[in-house]
Image (cartoon, rainbow, N blue to C red):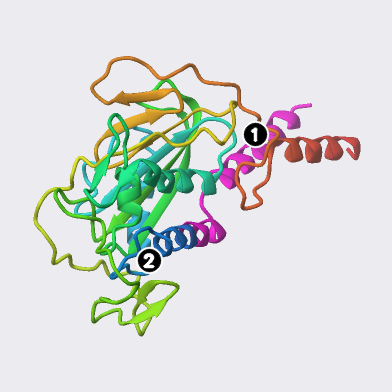
Amino acid sequence: MLWWPTLWAALLGHWVSHCYQLDSEDKATIVELHNRFRSHVLPTATNMRKMSWMDSLETTAAEYITKCVWDHNPNRGDTGENLFVGTGPFNLTKAVTGWYLEHQDYTYHNDSCEDNKLCGHYTQVVWADTYFVGCASHLCEEVEGLSFTMATMLVCNYSPQGNYEGEWPYEEGESCSKCPEEAPLCENNLCVAETPEASETPPVSEGTTKSPQPGPDTPTPSSSGPDTEHTTMGTDQTITTSEGEQPLSDTSSPPPDSEEEEEEPMNEGGKATLSSILLAATALLLFL
């Protein structure tokens, strides 16, 4: 029976490595979701750029996320950043959609957020001049700064950086009516370059030199179910949970971790589940 621990470790390692790392389908989903949300902003935008994936931003996120720290990456350079962490089944679509749903508490006409709400994730997602994104996910046994255990973190970095103080995320008006010269075409209400963007070369930001605003942010909706605990963080360095808001300076802890339903799919990309692996292991034992 000495082979059983080795088999179990191999199966568990396979499950962890495949359930919490972004694959090509996940990356395509992230880009598609961002562009879908950007194309449907209200009021409509004159200058909204189509977003593309950037490998160097993914590398920045991947190098930082393994630290499992609930704080912004101090070494991310001139890039924006959105963070998410949750226990229970990880749903990539709901994580990114949660950032967008902060628009429910955001008022474009005076660039403001409801009191005690947060909107900075949303404004970064729809920042017109930000058109590159790169993300990474990681399963953390513990998360420094939170009481979460066995939680999935998602970090997305953005370039050029958005969320500048005193600036609107985009210009209101007829869609694509003021596309920049480098992206003159219009596709699904988004300004598109005539040739694909060079995803490996970070763009040079020629905008304001102001620091990112402590943008308004709001809790990620609890639509992922009562079995899941999750928080999000925007560039304002404030966290929210499904139970309410907790600034980073607050010494209180988030609500206790809920039980994880490991039988559920880990995300919508068709990742392997623990239950399916256990079934495979059982079947293997029957034939030995």
Extreme-bottom residue of the structure: 194
Residue visible at 33% across and 14% down in the picture: 252
Residue 121 in the image: above or below residue 55: above
- Camera-nearest label, 1 or 2: 2
Tell me which residue sits at (59%, 36%) in the image.
89
Q: Quadrant of the N terminus?
A: top right
Q: Residue furthest right?
A: 287
Residues drawn in magenta: 1-30
Q: What type is the residue that disc 1 sits on?
A: Ala
Q: What's the mark number on residue 39? A: none
Residue 79 in the image: x percent, y percent?
A: 24, 54
Q: Amino acid at mark 2?
A: Met
Principal secondary structure, stretch drawn in magenta? helix
Q: Locate residue 46: give its quadrant.
A: bottom left
Q: In the rendered picture of this protein, how many numbered marks are placed on residues? A: 2
170 lies above or below 254: below
> Mark 2 sits on what residue?
51
Instruction: Give x and y (percent) for residue 127.
Output: 29, 58
Q: Is residue 125 magenta?
A: no
Label 2 neighbour load within 10 Å: few <14, some 14-19, many 20+: many
Which class describes the residues within 10 Å of circle 1: few (<14), some (14-19), or many (20+)? few
Residue 196 lies, in percent from the top left, at 38, 79
Dot placed on the residue nearer the N-terminal end, 1 or 2? 1
Quarter of image, res 85? top left
Q: Nearer the viewer, residue 96 or 203?
A: 96
For the point 66% across and 42% down, the residue is 265
Rounded to the nearest angstrom, the CA distance separating label 1 from label 2 is 40 Å
Q: Is residue 84 left or right of residue 182?
A: right
- Secondary structure, mark 2, is loop
Q: Is residue 181 above or below residue 103?
A: below
| Disc number placed over residue 9 in the picture, else none | 1
